[in-house]
Image: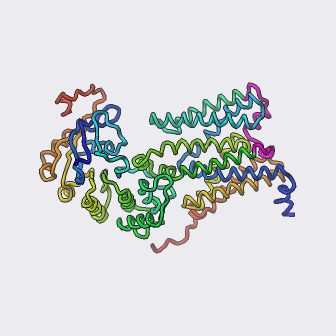
């Protein structure tokens, strides 16, 4: 049973493709690393999956999941850190699916929020305004919110950027815990060593798919070299893409 | 003596009691809106909207003279039109909301002044621009109270998405479609409260009873709920003190209220607990941890 199904998906901005003709599927419960150089289309692909970006072409099937079954952690969250909201309330927004517009936050829900904050190691930070947190602490808060969202598909965009090794270890443990619970996890990553040791499946992306499969088979120097070369072919005066033309795939 | 100065005017004159009731209703509804305007970095949007309601009010004035009901209806229509058009243009084209609003409100303001000058006198223009809270009749007071009640009810409904959209708009977009409607409802509340304040304070100062209390609250708390409460109290105190000042000195009531609020604002900037200037200059010794 596939959690995600890509049918010849092209995603991009202003008609210029950033992800070009991607097909394939992600099995339910898979732990997938999406790797590739900057500009390879990793973030674009993840935005397409969570539905912020509509495909220019093709379809992404979510296998029966709706938007509320997806938890998304963007690369550069547009969070207004100066807004007067406490860690507790902020993490609590992860309960949106249960509480919605009016649902009360009862004793059980409060306990869940406290447990989520505790499991990212931020006990005692409940009443701190989010503006007083460090970068790593904020990332922990965001993970706590993902935890509360209790989503079947979790999409993480470069979650360990500018995060120290202690925090990375803690948060990676959380990711593996989600995997063990049978949730589908997709993460855009740059740390090849981490991908090799912790992620079972890898998609090497360079606008188009370079390779996709079990990490050990896919993560080869050859594939990474191909990915490096294929990137950043933005052409202002590009003509409309004919999908069958093999040259446009290589472009 | 003190009783005569501070309470006497209200026991003695009905128009002062009406004005006080109106200003308290305006504070209860307008100040929370102002806090959200400030936190969403839309303070000047409120100002722009205040100009945008002018042509509607002017058309109402043109049709039925200085009839507050007609002017209110006209102001609401014009304000909604500008707010919704600007919001829709911003959301569908990616043009920033402030730029989109600026074009609409400038056109609206030019139109409004043109309409008033076709028929009205300078005194009419003054009334439209600065209002007169002391000339409030029962009917107008009921309209003000009704609008304030509607504002608080709607705000309660959109509170959660509004807060989440202010902190983390991308998150709200991924979990819910409530962000867009909540934003539009909020803009509508801004318009309602501007029109509401318009009768008491005029188009130019109506936004003052929303933004100034919010600015004051920002210097006294880091907590949203507390901020809203402080803003409401600050607005009501300014309203009361402004009325007393106006009664004793013959300063027009609208400017008097805003001047008192400004005074509170200056005190807050200087001595506020959160980021006040004196606090920054003399922070005390740094802490252990």
Q: Where residue A230 sits: x, y (%)?
A: 20, 38
Residue lying at 48% horizontally and 49% vertically, measured from the top left: B165
Q: Where residue A218 sits: x, y (%)?
A: 14, 48
Q: Where residue A118 sits: x, y (%)?
A: 38, 68
Residue A20 belongs to the span the image colors magenta: no
Q: What type of secondary structure mainly makes up the magenta span?
A: helix
Q: In this view, does A148 lie to the left or right of B59?
A: left
The residue nearer to you, when weighing B209 against A2, is A2
- Can you say whether B256 is above or below A6 in the image? below
- Can you say whether B8 is above or below B174 in the image? below
Give, as a single range, the part of the protein colored magenta.
B116-140
Q: Is residue A207 left or right of residue A106?
A: left
Residue lying at 45% horizontally and 60% vertically, measured from the top left: A130
- Quarter where residue B106 is shown: top right
Residue B248 shows in the view: yes
The residue nearer to you, when weighing B264 against B89, is B89
Q: Where residue A169 sits: x, y (%)?
A: 27, 64
Residue B139 belongs to the span the image colors magenta: yes
**Which quarter shows the C terminus of chain A?**
top left
**Extreme residue in the bottom direction:** B288
- Quarter where residue B125 is shown: top right
């Amino acid at each position: 049973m596939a959690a995600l199904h890509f049918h010849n998906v092209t995603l991009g901005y202003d008609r210029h493709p950033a992800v070009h003709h991607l097909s394939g599927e992600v099995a339910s419960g898979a732990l997938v690393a999406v790797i590739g150089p900057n500009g390879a289309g990793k973030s674009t692909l993840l935005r397409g999956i969570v539905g912020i970006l509509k495909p220019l072409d093709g379809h992404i099937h979510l296998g029966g999941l709706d938007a509320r079954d997806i938890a998304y952690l963007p690369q550069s969250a547009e969070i207004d850190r100066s807004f007067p909201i406490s860690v507790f309330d902020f993490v609590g927004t992860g309960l949106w699916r249960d509480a919605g517009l009016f649902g009360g936050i009862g004793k059980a829900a409060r306990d869940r929020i406290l447990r989520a904050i505790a499991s990212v190691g931020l006990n005692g930070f409940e009443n701190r305004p989010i503006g007083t947190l460090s970068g790593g602490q904020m990332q922990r808060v965001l993970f706590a919110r993902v935890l509360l969202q209790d989503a079947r598909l979790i999409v993480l965009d470069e979650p360990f950027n500018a995060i120290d090794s202690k925090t990375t270890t803690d948060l990676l443990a959380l990711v593996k815990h989600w995997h063990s619970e049978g949730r589908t996890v997709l993460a855009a990553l740059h740390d090849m060593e981490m991908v090799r040791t912790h992620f079972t499946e890898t998609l090497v992306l360079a606008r188009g798919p370079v390779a996709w499969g079990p990490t050990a088979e896919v993560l080869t120097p050859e594939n990474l070299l191909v990915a490096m070369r294929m990137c950043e072919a933005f052409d202002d005066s590009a003509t409309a893409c004919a999908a069958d033309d093999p040259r446009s795939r290589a472009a | 003596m003190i009783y005569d100065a501070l309470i006497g005017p209200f026991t003695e004159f009905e128009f002062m009691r009406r004005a006080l009731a109106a200003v308290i209703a305006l504070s209860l509804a307008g100040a929370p809106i102002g806090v959200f305007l400030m936190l969403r970095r839309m303070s000047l949007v409120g100002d722009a909207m205040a100009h945008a309601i002018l042509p509607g009010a002017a058309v109402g004035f043109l049709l039925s003279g200085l009839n507050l009901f007609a002017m209110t209806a006209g102001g609401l229509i014009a304000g909604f039109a500008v707010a919704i058009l600007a919001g829709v243009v911003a959301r569908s084209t990616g043009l920033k909301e402030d730029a989109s609003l600026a074009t609409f409100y400038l056109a609206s303001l030019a139109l409004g002044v043109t309409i008033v000058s076709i028929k009205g006198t300078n005194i009419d223009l003054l009334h439209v621009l600065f209002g007169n809270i002391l000339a409030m009749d029962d009917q107008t007071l009921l309209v003000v109270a009704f609008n304030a009640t509607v504002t608080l009810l709607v705000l309660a409904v959109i509170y959660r998405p509004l807060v989440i959209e202010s902190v983390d708009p991308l998150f709200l977009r991924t979990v819910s479609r409530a962000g867009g409607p909540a934003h539009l409802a909020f803009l509508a509340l801004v318009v309602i409260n501007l029109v509401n304040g318009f009768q008491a304070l005029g188009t130019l100062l109506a936004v003052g009873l929303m933004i100034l209390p919010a600015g004051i609250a920002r210097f006294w708390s880091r907590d949203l709920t507390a901020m809203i409460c402080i803003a409401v109290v600050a607005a009501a105190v300014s309203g009361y003190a402004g009325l007393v000042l106006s009664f004793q000195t013959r300063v027009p009531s609208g400017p008097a209220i805003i001047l008192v609020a400004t005074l509170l604002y200056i005190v807050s900037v200087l001595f506020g607990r959160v980021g006040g200037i004196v606090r920054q200059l003399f922070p005390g010794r740094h802490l252990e941890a």
